[in-house]
Image: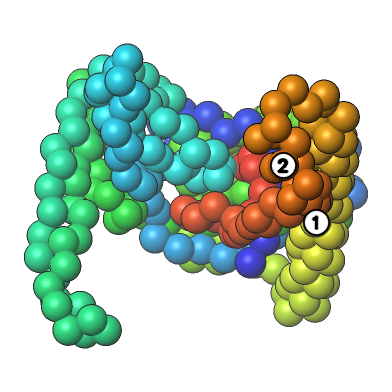
Amino acid sequence: MPRFIHRWMLTRRFCTMLVMLALTHPADAAATNDTPEVVSSLRVFSTQPRVFEYLFTGAMSGPATNTEPLLCFRDLAGNAPTVRINEPLGSYSVIGFTPRTTRVFNKSVSAYLDNDVSLVTLRDAAGSNRVLTVGRPLIEPGLMACLVSTASGGWGYVRSGDALNIEGVDVTVIRVATNDVTIRAQALDISIPPIDDTARKSILALWESRRRDAEARQARELALATEAKRLQASKDNAAAALQPIFTAEAAAAEQATFYGDYYPFMTGGLPPCFGRHHGGEGHWRH
């Protein structure tokens, strides 16, 4: 599944009416001067049940200065915002949080364990509420689709009514059906077809290459940071070794001092994902 960066700048906007114009197939884009070139490379990579744009991932205790729990979310773009009750979350307001647990039998340990089933309530500008359970996507009516550019490898999720910007082109999503998405760009309604097997394999290979490059880059950055810490620790140890000895106890201890290197614990990994492919940040990615 895809990852990697460059934002579609997704915003939600519901169409009050759908005016169907003559559909233009992306393959005909070359013959249509008004059709953006980027649209001609778009394909439907996959479709799935539509989900609400936020997933509630859990709550953390607040610091001593603010004991209100910190509520954690993940959105379709892969961002991980944290808010408190009565604070905004995108176009919504967080109006309630109910901590709850349930007892579930765990076969691996042959015991009942507490399972977090806490609830959070969001309210939109129209006054409608949505109740989210931790770790469970909120399924909505209809479908959502993952669009991919066969030219750049960029990708993003879209739903009917979404207004977004794809590589500089303003697009409104008119309809999402199984393996078919209709968008409106520059006053044209354009039908995006499903991706074929050859293009799918090429895109998967491109994504895998970018995944390896990103992991290699992260490894290099971690190695540089680790080396910088090691050098600083060595300098600190050397400076400490040059400090004058003022007491007999310190002089005796100095004889047994070993000034070694600094070995930090190295850890890594990717954050959990929601409605997207692993890794990266942003909604329109490369």
Q: Is residue 271 visible?
A: yes
Left or right of residue 64, residue 128 in this image? left
* Rendered position, 37 above or below 128: below
Query: Residue 159, how many percent across, how many down?
Result: 48, 46
The numbered disc on residue 219 is: 1
What amino acid type should be assigned to the residue bearing mark 1? Ala
Q: Quadrant of residue 276?
A: bottom right
User: In percent of the image, x 65 and y 55: which residue is there?
Assistant: 265
Q: Is residue 214 visible?
A: no
The numbered disc on residue 179 is: none
Which one is in front, 172 or 18? 172
Which one is in front, 163 or 91? 91
What amino acid type should be assigned to the residue bearing mark 2? Ala
User: In percent of the image, x 55 and y 45: which residue is there?
Assistant: 78
Q: Secondary structure at mark 2?
A: helix
Q: Secondary structure at mark 1?
A: helix
Kindly identify which residue carries mark 2.
252
